[in-house]
Amino acid sequence: MTGTTLAPARSARAGGGAARRRGRGRAALRAVWAPALLGAALFGAWQLAAAAGATPGSLPSPADLATYLGESVLKSEFWSAVGSTMLSWTAGFAVSVLVGCALGMLAGLNGVVDRLLFPVVEFFRPIPSIVYLPLVILVAGTGRLSVMVLVAGGAIWPVLLQTVAGVHDTDPVLRDMTRAYAFTRRERMRWCVLPSAAPFIATGVRISATISLVVVVTTELVGTGKGLGGVMSTAYQTGSYVVLFGTGLAAAVLGVLLDQALGLLEKRALHWHAAYREGAR
Amino acid sequence: MLEVEGLGHVYRTASGEVEAVRQVDLTVAEGEIVTLVGPSGAGKTTLLRSLAGLLPYSRGEVRLGGDVVRSPHPDMALVFQDYTRSLMPWATVRQNVLLPIRKKVRSRAERDARVDAALAEVGLADAADRYPWQLSGGMQQRVALARGLAYRPKMLLFDEPFASVDAQTRADLEDLVLDVCAHLRMTALFVTHDIDEAAYLADRIVVVSHRPSTVRAVLDVDLPRPRDQVTTKSLPAFAELRSRIFPLLRAESAEATA
Ligand SMILES: Nc1ncnc2c1ncn2[C@@H]1O[C@H](COP(=O)(O)OP(=O)(O)OP(=O)(O)O)[C@@H](O)[C@H]1O
Ligand SMILES: [Mg+2]
């Protein structure tokens, strides 16, 4: 079955409930402190190496980057670049999630759609969407529409595949229940299919969010010249390495923040899921 | 109320046909509690899903109050074998009980009243706003029962509902089913593989064979009501009933393994 349909074997998230619950308090502390310490150590080493002149001349030191970013956050150009990137990200990500979910639902519920869609998905999925960039810009210009198309071309797949897997994971007993108790089609979707698929979809959404940002920044960098990627592109051409790396760092922070925000949303939406349940009441 | 004639079901699988139910005839009269007892894997769930209109059976006919059942009938409700799978973990106890009657009962006040009454009937009035997974196994199965009751069916079907709870909880739940059926004059078909349970609950017992199931015997139960876990089970008539069912199931298993 797995070989001929869109469903991957199983969602990692749907399986890992027990491990997540274990020792949450201390684990949370460790989850904050361990990466913080590691990050501090890395930046410290980098700073020392830069001070000793052991890094390539074009690579700024962390102190330079911190100074640059500290000044940037007070300027409106920085925020308009962030805003432009965010807007492209939101648009492309939203399209990916909506279209991916809708197609995934169709394929998950309907075997014919699944079999029709499967070869198409398997063909296009491994293609890095950035290879379409010249064509898309030629046809649609350097506007936001082009970015949306490229983002969707890269970020739609995880949502699509996870949705199909989630719909297939609907418990047959629950399906029997909704039929025995005469749920309408709509009620069945709202109360059975969607919530069953939700943990899978959430995983796909998180992956898509990250891919979306990658594609947005890349597209800006090599194509449209707007947003954070655009700032990096200009800085690269003029040899302003502090701006180049500082803006890159800002994009990295943006990625982490977006992922964390989605993680919180997921935790709230799936509060009933074994992985997120509160302890005994 | 329920009439089953020559029911049979054959599963068609990739590796060939599996005959789960061969030939089952049975009737359940209005207000009667019939238990159906058979060995594990006999085809009981298959039979019950056919009766409930969830499985398009291969042969025979099922009628409820004269209507031929081919799809789920509004006068029939089901309590499933596995409550952890038949209750929605993303919905509260109240929502689980209320959702099936949303279209049936248009008035919100009446709907809420029905849900409250059903939850009170099973002793879960306080748990309405909790989630099923916050409750014990016995309580979860009572939620499933409340959902069936709130639906106000003429007939309740039970598929080994108490197979996975401890003995004490099971006894309590059996008594709850008897109380509720008596109180609401419910007709019930109760599937189990437990001989004691079959005898304790029933007006009549249908014993089915190992797969493919056929009816081996139908026994009338003359135990007085209301029943009691201690006194009923120590009656000589109860022991005699057990000793009649036991060999019917045993002979079957012996044949099946031979
Ligand atoms: N979907 C299916 N496809 C093929 N065979 C099936 C299917 N469902 C059940 N069977 C087979 O039919 C037979 C009867 O199964 P069924 O679940 O009805 O038994 P049961 O009496 O309810 O068992 P238990 O007491 O364990 O609940 C079994 O041999 C089983 O393997
Ligand atoms: Mg069964």
Image (tube, coloured by chain):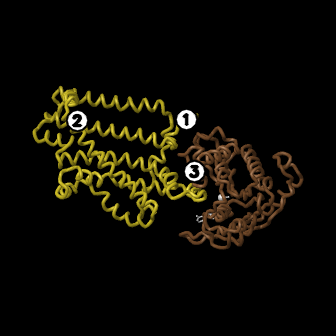
Chain colours: A yellow, B brown
Q: Position of residue B236 (x, y in %)?
A: 89, 53
Report the Cα–Cα distance between label 3 and label 2: 48 Å
Question: Which residue is label 1 attached to?
Answer: A279
**Discs 3/2, front:** 3
Q: Position of residue B243 (x, y in %)?
A: 84, 58
> Mark 2: is the Cβ under 8 angstroms from ligand 1?
no
Q: Is residue B169 left or right of residue A196?
A: right
Q: Secondary structure at mark 3?
A: helix
Q: Is residue A92 visible?
A: yes
Q: Residues within 10 Å of mark 2 (few under 14, many from 20)?
A: some
Quadrant in which the C terminus of chain A appears: top right
Which numbered circle lies on residue A79?
2
Task: Tell me where residue A85 sits by quadrant.
Answer: top left
Q: Secondary structure at mark 2?
A: helix
Q: Secondary structure at mark 1?
A: loop
Which numbered circle lies on residue A268?
none
Looking at the image, which is closer to me, A78 or B180?
B180
| Amino acid type, mark 3 | Leu
